Amino acid sequence: MQPAPTTSNRGILRYSQGREKFSMNRLIPSPDLRSFITHYWLIAWDLRGQNSYRQEVLQHPGVNLVFERGKTCVHGVRKGRSSYLLQEQGEVFGILFRPGGFYPFLQEPVSSLTDQSVPLDSLFDVDRNALEDTLFSMETGSDRIHVVEQFLRNQHPKRDPQIETINEIVHYIIEHREINRVEEIAVHFGLSPRTLQRIFSLYVGVSPKWVIQRSRIQDAVELADGGVTPEWSKLALDLGYYDQAHFIKDFKTIVGSSPHEYATNGLN
């Protein structure tokens, strides 16, 4: 199994600091599951004798299934920041589903999972402890992928063309920073705003407007984490904001500090 081609750490806050605390690897799914899954991710840490470390993330619009001994859960999209406390020694194995990609497994509105973490065996008929034991007894990423892919295939998900449409829309939002209105997206894809909202609630769990805002803030964070403080007023306009004040308000609400504070603290 080869590492996934993407090396983007988009959404991981202060990644340059975090990578000193943990190691991360991403792997691609087998061809028959790629219509549902973005990638697998493996994180391991050893902080024995050190202070604990809290890693914060601005989540993508995709559900995560995270395997951890005694804690395996399905995590819906978090509208705010999500965080994980790393302490002592540990490892997790995660599956990031494509936007809409978890719907064929859930078969009910994905919005029911938004801002929720649900134990795996609450959603699927599975012995969670046995699955964890099998998964973490495997030493290689390839072997672990084989275990989780057998579990996923046993759920018999059906391909859904709506997932491809949703991912085209999300990609369009990411690539066109100037877009800031749902109506613009609806017109481009020949959908009514109401239909677009309904599709995203059913398949993704968050609104198209949320995806626009999250993508813009992730863009800003990536630039701030790059070591060069941007010209915030120009960046606000580049990201489709009408003015700098609205951009700063959104950034502070989502990230927890102003753009300048975030960039400055990241250089310390």
Image (cartoon, rainbow, N blue to C red):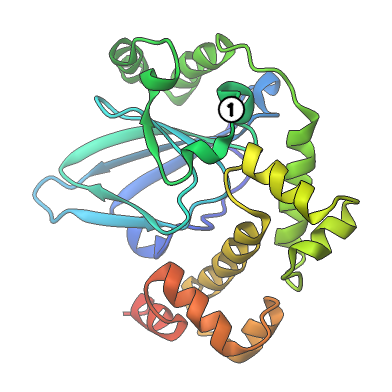
Report the residue at 87% width, 52% height from top.
Answer: 189
Residue 83 at what x, y percent from top left?
A: 33, 53
Q: Secondary structure at mark 1?
A: loop
Dot 1 amino acid type: Glu
Q: Give me the residue at 31% from left, 10% from top.
A: 130
The residue drawn where x is 63% and y is 44% is: 201
- Specify whether 225 is left or right of 264: right
Check disc 1 and report the residue beneath it: 108
Tell me which residue sits at (70%, 29%) in the image: 35
In the rendered image, residue 212, in percent from the top left (x then y), is placed at 65, 63
Is residue 107 in sight in this rendering? yes
x and y, in percent, of residue 260 in the image: 44, 85
Q: Is residue 268 left or right of residue 57?
A: left
Q: Quadrant of the N terminus?
A: top right
Image quarter of residue 242 = bottom right
The correct choice, above or below, for 248 with respect to 12 in the image is below
Residue 159 in the image: state x and y as whole percent.
Answer: 74, 22
